[in-house]
Amino acid sequence: MYRPLPTPKEMSRWDAAAQQDYGLLQELLMENASREALAVLLQEYGPVRGKQAVLLAGPGNNGGDAFALARHLADHGALVSTFHAKPVESYTGAAAYHLGLLLKLQLPLVPLLDTHIDHLPPPDILVDGLLGTGFQGEMRPDYRQWIAYINRLPRQVFILALDIPTGLNGLTGRPSPEAVRATTTVSFEATKIGLAFPEAAAYVGKEVARPIGIPAKVKRTMPARQHLLEASLLDQLNTASDNLLHKGRAGHVLVAGGSPGLTGAPLLAALGALRSGAGLASVACPSGLGNEIKTGWPEVMLSPLGNGDCWSEECARELRAPLDRCDALILGPGLGRSPETAAFCRSVLRLDLPPLVGDADFLFALSRNPDLFALLPEHAVLTPHPGEMAALTGLSIAQVQENRIEVAREHAVKWSVVLVLKGAGTVIASRDGDVYVSPFACANLAVGGSGDVLCGVVGALMAAGHEPLTAANIAVFWHGLAGKALEARFPARGNLAREIADMLPHVMSR
C-alpha cells in the first residue's frame, strides 16, 4: 500500500545502524550498491561490451559507488574511464577501498580538475557519482561545469545517476540551482523523498529502487516518516458485487454548501461521493437555492435550510435533522465568504458531527476565524490547495510550495487533523506527523471542481467506515488515477470535473 520514502537523514541512520548494530561493513554495502547499479544499467541500456563508459566519482561515498561500478563495467567489457573529484590519496574509508581495487587493476583514473571538458568526446554511457543525497551548501564551480557538460550531451548518451542526480536536493526534489538530467536513477535501498516529487521528474528520469542489504529490522525499528501511495491501496475497497447490499448500508454523504452563483460545487462533491460508492448523497443549502440545486443531478437529494439564499443560525439549527441521517459531512463547497457563513460554520462545529471533510469556503472561514480550529472534531479531514494553505498558515504560496512535506506535517499535528495539501504530488499528513505522497502529477486534474470531486470521494469512504487517514489516502490515489486515465481521451486537457467523477468506477480494474 505504501512505499517508504526516507529523507537523506533517515537513510543515513539506516546505513549507520546496519554497520554499527549488525556489523555490515560499509565496503560490503558499497559493493552491493554497485552490483545493483550494474544490474539496472544492463537492464535499461543493454550489453556494455566495447562501449565507452565515463564515471564521475565525487569526494564521498557516492564516489565510492562509482569506483566500485567502474570495476564491474570493466569486467563486462566496457571501456572505462573514471574521473575523481579529489586527490587519490585523500579518499578514506570504503571509497578508498574501492578506489584501491581500481588502482590494482590499473584502470584509467583522471583528476576532474585536470580535465578540459570541452575536449572530452561524448561517451556511450555516463555514470553520475559526483554528489549524493547528503549534499548541502554551495556547489563547486567545476561541478557546475560538469553538470552543464552532462546536460549538453547528445540524447543517445545513457546517463545513470547513482542514488540521486548531482545537484538535486534529496529532501525537496529541487535543483540547487542546477542538477544532472539523468536517463535513469538507481536509488539505493529506497527512493529518497525528494525523488518522489513531480519537480524532480525531469532530473531523475526513470527511477529504479534496489536493495543493498540494509536489514529489514533496521527499517522496521527506524521507519521512514514519509510514504508513497501505491495501487494496492485500492485493494481495501470492497469492489465485489454484494447482491444483498442496500443504499442505507453503502453510506450517506451530506454536503453542506452552495451560495448564489456557486451551486455547482456541492453538486460535484455529491457526484464524487456517489461515483465512489456512496449509497446516498444529499446537499444541504439555503432554501432559496433549492431550485438551482434540483436542476443538477436527480440522484442528489436536497435538504433546504432556513429562508432565503444566505446561510444563517437558523440553517445551522435545521441542519441537525439531516445530520442525524448521514454518515459523513462535507462542509465548504460553494459555501460563500460572507460573515454569516463564518457564524454558520461556528454553529455547525458545535453540533455532534459525523466524520467531517472541510474544503473550500469552510477553509476560508477557518483562516479568518482562527478560534474555529479549537472546535474541529478529531475525525476531521481538511483539503486545502496551496492558496488556501497559505491563508490558513500565514505563509506565502511560494513558502508553502517550497517545503510541502514539512508545512503539511507541522500543521496536521498542530491542528490535530488529517491534512490533504492538494497539487501535483498531493501530500497527505496525519495527526501523528506521518506523511504520504501521491505519485500523480496530472494536468487533467487542474480544472475547476476537481477538488470538490475529491472531497466527495473522501466523504464517501469515511461514510463507508474507513478511518480519516485511510480514506484520504485512498481518495487521493483513486482521484489521481481517474485523472490520469482521462489523458487518453483528453491529451490536451479540456475534460470537465464531472468527467473525473464519472471515471472513478472505471479505473478500479487498473
Image: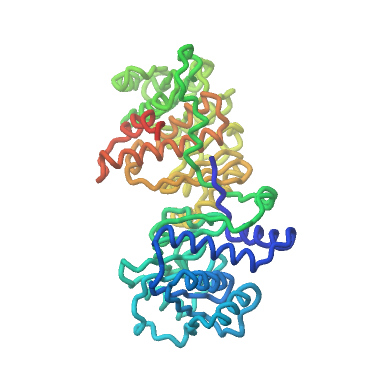
* Image x and y of residue 220, in percent: 67, 48
User: Can residue 136 be seen in the rendering of this structure?
Assistant: no
Q: 423 or 119, which is in the foreground?
A: 119
| Relative vertical location of residue 270 with respect to residue 298 in this rendering, above or below | below
Name which residue lies at 34% across and 32% down.
503
Q: 469 or 181, which is in the foreground?
A: 181
| Relative vertical location of residue 20 with respect to residue 294 in this rendering, above or below | below
Q: Is residue 294 left or right of residue 133?
A: left
Tell me which colouring the rendered structure shows.
Answer: rainbow
Name which residue lies at 59% across and 77% down.
101
Q: 435 or 391, which is in the foreground?
A: 435
Image quadrant in which you'd find residue 18: bottom right
Name which residue lies at 53% across and 83% down.
106
* Image x and y of residue 269, in percent: 40, 29
Q: Residue furthest bottom?
A: 114
Image quadrant in which you'd find residue 19: bottom right
* Image x and y of residue 302, in percent: 39, 17
